[in-house]
Image (tube, helix red, strand yellow):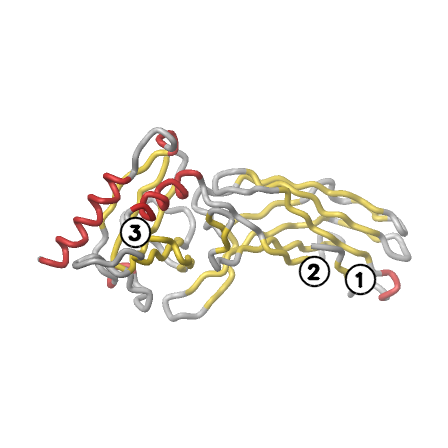
Amino acid sequence: MGFKRLFGIGDPDEAIEVDTQVFGPVYPGGDVKGEVLLRGGARDTPVDGIYLRFTVRCTRYDGEERDYEFDSCVARPSDFTLHKGEEQRLTFSERLSWEVPVSELGGRALGVVLSVKSKFRRDWNDDGTEVDNDLLHMSALPLQEAVLDAFAEEGYYCDSAYVVDSYIPGVEQHRGFYQTFVLTDRSPGPRRPEQLEVVFHTNVVGALVHVRRAAPEVRSWDKKPPVRRFAAAHHEVGHVDWRPRVRKVLEELVLLDEL
């Protein structure tokens, strides 16, 4: 990440430097921990606090993109004076929602952009200045890895993922977005879908896995092809063969085409 010089606080010669670091790995439903390192400039600087925002790049129904803030926290300590040339380490820790999207699957980037944005405030009257903006690497849960591995064993491999600024109908959702994994058939055959869309609605118990034929050009959930679902629990990872559930949902998708 590296230091970034913060200007706009007094004279440029008084500028302080800021470096935000996240300690990984980070998973949905887990803690994101790290520190913010401040280095003082030529004069003492009052610090009300360093505020961190965790965001994900979402695609709206009209195709436009926006950054959705899904969690935030304050680095500690706060309300102190950063003295001339002094280095000060602030720490932060925040428990993330289970619905947070992932940016990496098996160590491979999926194209999903998550960020941690640090904002500096001098006092309570200050709206704050964004001083650092870094990528946040979010690893897939063991449950997600295991289920997608089962799809791969049936010939469907995850190529990419994207995040939609919308809700899944009929589920208890706490964040206004969901992540879609795009799977491509590497063993094409008669009646098999060429691509699938897989969505995990995850919570502390496990996930409801939504599967449908892919229609990436369609934004609305209700206007996409019909969905079939199966449940998967975190405690089943390593003890359950997911392939029967995956085969069943693939068979159901084929039957839907014949109706």
SS for dot 3 = loop
> Horizontal placement of 32 versus 161: left or right?
right
Query: Which mark is first along the chain, 1 or 2?
Result: 1
Q: Report the Cα–Cα distance between label 3 and label 1.
A: 56 Å
3 vs 2, front mark: 3
Q: What amino acid is at disc 2?
A: Thr
Q: What amino acid is at disc 3?
A: Gly
> Horizontal placement of 166 versus 188: left or right?
right
Asked whether disc 2 touches disc 1, contact meaning CB atoms under 8 Å apart, the reply is yes
Q: Report the Cα–Cα distance between label 2 and label 1.
A: 9 Å
Camera-side residue: 142 or 201?
142
Q: In this view, does 28 lie above or below 225?
A: above
Residue that appears at 29% across and 59% down: 195
Which residue is identified by label 2? 129
Residue 110 coordinates in the image, percent (x, y): 47, 56
Residue 188 coordinates in the image, percent (x, y): 25, 58
Which residue is identified by label 1? 9
Query: Which mark is first along the chain, 2 or 3?
Result: 2
Which residue is identified by label 3? 155
> Horizontal placement of 97 versus 49: left or right?
left
Residue that appears at 65% across and 41% down: 92
Q: What amino acid is at disc 1?
A: Ile
Residue that appears at 71% across and 56% down: 125
Residue 130 coordinates in the image, percent (x, y): 67, 60
Residue 158 picture quarter: bottom left
Camera-side residue: 128 or 258?
258
